[in-house]
Image (cartoon, rainbow, N blue to C red):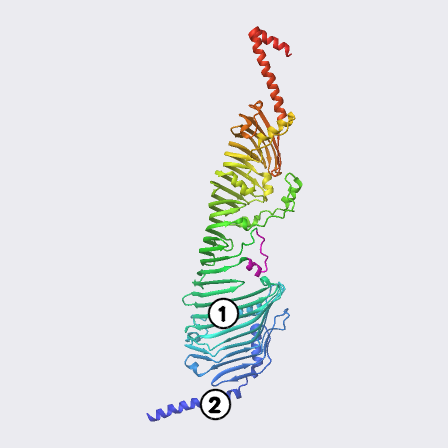
Amino acid sequence: MGKLLKFLLGLVVLLVVLVVIAAVVLPMVIDPNDYKEEIAASVEKQTGRKLSIEGDMALSVFPWLGLDIGPTQLSNAEGFAAPYMARMEAVEVRVKLLPLLRKKLEVNTVRLDGLRLNLGKNKQGETNWADITAQLETADTPAEKPAGGGDSSGTASSGKSLERFEIGGIEVSDAQLRWDDRSTDAVYEVNELSFTTGSIEPDEAFALELRFQVAVSQPVVRGQFELTGDILLAEAMDAVTVTAATLGVNLDGDGVPGGQLEAAMTTDLKLDLAAQTLSLSGLALKALGLNVTGQLQGTAISSDDPRFKGTLDIAEFSPRELLQALGQEAPQTADPAVLGKAAASLTWDASLQHFAATVLTVQLDDSQLQGDARVEQFDAPAIKLTAMLDRFNLDRYTPPPAPADTAPVKAGNKAAANTAASAEPELPLDTLRALNLDVQLGVGELQASGLRSSDIKVQLKAKDGVLNVKPFNAKLYGGAVQADASLDVRKNTPRFSVNENLTGVQAGPLLKDLTGKEQILGTANVNAKLAGVGLSSAKIKQTLTGTAGFEFTDGAVKGVNIASLIRSARAKIKGEPAPEQTGPNQTDFALMKGSAKITNGKVVNDDLLMKSPLLRITGAGTVSLPQETIDYTLTTKFVGSLKGQGGEGMEELEGLSIPVHVGGTFSKPTYAPDLAAVLSDAAKAEVEKKVEKEKKKLQKKLGDDLTDKLLKDIFK
C-alpha cells in the first residue's frame, strides 16, 4: 500500500512539473507568429478575402491560455471604395486552463480596441459581405452521412456542455461602424463606440455601459446614444433580466423633427427563452414634452404567432407645443385657446396581424372620448372603432373667418364660380377605396358650422370603395333628424346619395346659427332624397338630382313684409306718399308647405302654399344651386283687411291675386310686386260689375232674350 501511495504521489508531482514546464517552455518553443501565413491562407480559402496580420501575436499557456493579436485587417470586396472591410488594432483573450477540467469556463476580461467595420451596398444593390456569406453557406452544406447512419463528426457532439462560466468582463473601445449605401447615396456612421461590462457569471448581476456617436449624411442627423443597466443571466443561459435599463438620446440636424431631440427611456426587462415570455415593466419615456408610461407582456415570442399586451398612458401635454417641437406650425384656429391640452390612456393587445385598444380614453381640451378600437391585417388594414364623445365644438378648431377685405365669389358669376370650383380640393379616391372601416360613434353634444345638436348616434361603414353612413340620428333645435348617406368611389367619378328627415325642428334658431339670419321662423318638418355625381361640392351641385318636401307651421318669412310692399306700390301708383311701416319686416303665416324636384342642380317648385289670417300665398318657380340665383313668383291673395299687418285697409284689393316676383341671388334676393296689373284687373272687374248690374235692370224691363240681343249689339 505504501508503495502505491508513493507511486501516485510521484505521478501527481510529475504532472505538476510537466504543466509548469509546458507553461514556461511552450511560449518559448511555439511562436504563433510563425503561423501568420497559414492563418491568412485558411481565411482566404474560407472567405476569398485577404487577411493581413500586421502586428505581433503573443501566446501564453499557464495559468491562462491567452492570445494577444496586434493590428489586423480583412480586405474589402472588389468595387467598394473602403480600403478594408474590417480592422482591429488589438484584441486580448485569456482562458483559465484548470477549470476546464471541471467543465467550468473562466475567461479574463476580453478586450477589443480600434475596431473598424466598413459595410456597404453598391448601386446594383449588392453588399460587400454577400460573397463571404455565399462561400460560408457552401462550406456549411452537410456531407452525406456514412453508411449505417453514423455521425461522421465522431463523438464530439455527444459531449456534455459546460456546467458554469465566468467572464471577467468585456471592454470594447474606440470602435467605428460605417454603412455606405450607394443605392440611396446615404452614409450612416457609428463613431467612438465603447462597450464595457462588469464580471459576467450566471445568477450574478453585472453592469453594462454602451455609448456611441451617430452621423447620417442625408437627411443630416448627428448625436449620441447612451445605454446603461444591470444584467442578470440565468444559470442555464436561457433567461436574462435587465434592471433599471436607461437609454438616453440627444440628436440634432435637418433629419430630426424640429431639428433637436432629447429623449430618455427607462424600463425593467425580463426575457425567458424557455418559457417564451418577455416583459417590460416600469416603462417611462420622456421626449418632446411628452411623458409616456406603460408596461408590456409577451408570450410565444419565438413562435410564428407571438402575442403581446400592455398599457400605455400619455400624461397631459400641449398639442401646440408638441407641433412646435416637431418643427410643424400649429394650425390657425377660430379659437386660439384650443389644442392647449391633451392626454390619452389605453389597454392594448397585439400580434403580428392585429392591434387592439381594448380600453381607450382620449382627452382633447374640454372633450373626452372613451371606447375601443381594433386594426386587423396591417398590409390592408380593417379598422373597427366604437366610441362615445361627451362634447365637441368643431367650430373652435376650424380656420378663423377670412379678413373683411377678402372679396367673396359673387353668386351668379359663372367664371368666378368655375375658378373657385377648380381651386377646391377633390376627393382622395385611392385613399377612400382602400378604406375598410366599421365605426360606431356617439356624441353627447356637438357644434359644427354653427349648428348645435345632441344625443348623436352614427354608424359609418366603408369597404370595397363604398362608404355608408346609416343610420345618423340626433336631436336638433327642439326636434330630431334621421338620415343615411352613401358614397360610391369605385369608379373615377364618385356618386353619392342622401336621405334626410327633420321633424319638429325650430327653423329660426337653426337658420340663425347656420347662416347668421333667421330667414324663416316656425316649426319645420323637412324631407329630402338626393343624389349627385362629382369629385367636389361644386360638381355635385351641378349634378344634384332628387326630391324634397317641407312644411312649416306657426311661423314667418323674415326680411319681407308682403302687405307693406303692396301698400307702398299702391301709394306710388296713386301718387300718394308711401305709408310708414310700423310692424316687423316679416310675413306671418300659420302654414307654409310645398315640394320640390331637383334636376342637375335646378330646383323646381310649383306647389308652394302659405296661409295666414290675411293672406293666401301660392308660389312657383326655379332656383339654380350652381349659380345661386332665384327666379320665383309668389301669388298673394288677400282674404282680410291689411290692418292686421300694420296699415289702413285697402278693401278694393280684397279677393284679388297679386303676383310678387322674387329674383336676384341667395345673398341678395329682390322682391317686386306687380300691383299695376292687379289694379287694371280690378278696374275691369269694376266695369264688369256695373255691366252686370245694368243687365239685371234691363232683364226686369225687357226680359232675358231681348236683353241678351241688345247687349250683343252694343258690344259688337
Mark 2 or mark 1, whichever is nearer to me: 1
Name the residue tied to disc 1.
246
Q: Amino acid at mark 1?
A: Thr
Residue found farthest to the left = 1
Q: Amino acid at mark 2?
A: Ile
- Residue contact between numbered discs 2 and 1, judged by CB atoms under 8 Å: no
As drawn, 566 above or below 47: above
Q: Nearer the viewer, residue 233 or 425?
A: 425
Residue at figure coordinates x 44%, y 83% from the top left = 98
Going by the image, does 387 lie left or right of 660?
left
Going by the image, does 339 lie left or right of 149?
right
Q: Is residue 71 magenta?
A: no
Ranked by sequence position, the earlier of labels 2 and 1 is 2
* Quadrant (top left, top right, bottom left, bottom right) of the N terminus: bottom left
Highlighted range, magenta: 320-333
Gap between marks 2 and 1 measured at Cα: 50 Å
Name the residue tied to disc 2.
21
Please state the horizontal and vertical placement of residue 136, each as a whole percent of the image: 54, 70
How many other residues sit within 10 Å of disc 2, few (<14), some (14-19) or many (≥20)?
A: few
As drawn, 18 above or below 190: below
Mark yes or no: residue 607 visible.
Answer: no
Q: Nearer the viewer, residue 171 or 653?
A: 653
Q: Nearer the viewer, residue 174 or 559?
A: 559
* Quadrant (top left, top right, bottom left, bottom right) of the C terminus: top right
Tell me where residue 420 sits by quadrant: top right
Which numbered marker is on residue 631?
Answer: none
Please state the horizontal and vertical placement of residue 423, each as a whole percent of the image: 63, 46
Mark yes or no: residue 200 visible.
Answer: yes
Q: Is residue 325 magenta?
A: yes
Please state the horizontal and vertical placement of residue 596, each as a whole percent of the image: 54, 33
Tell me where residue 271 sits by quadrant: bottom left
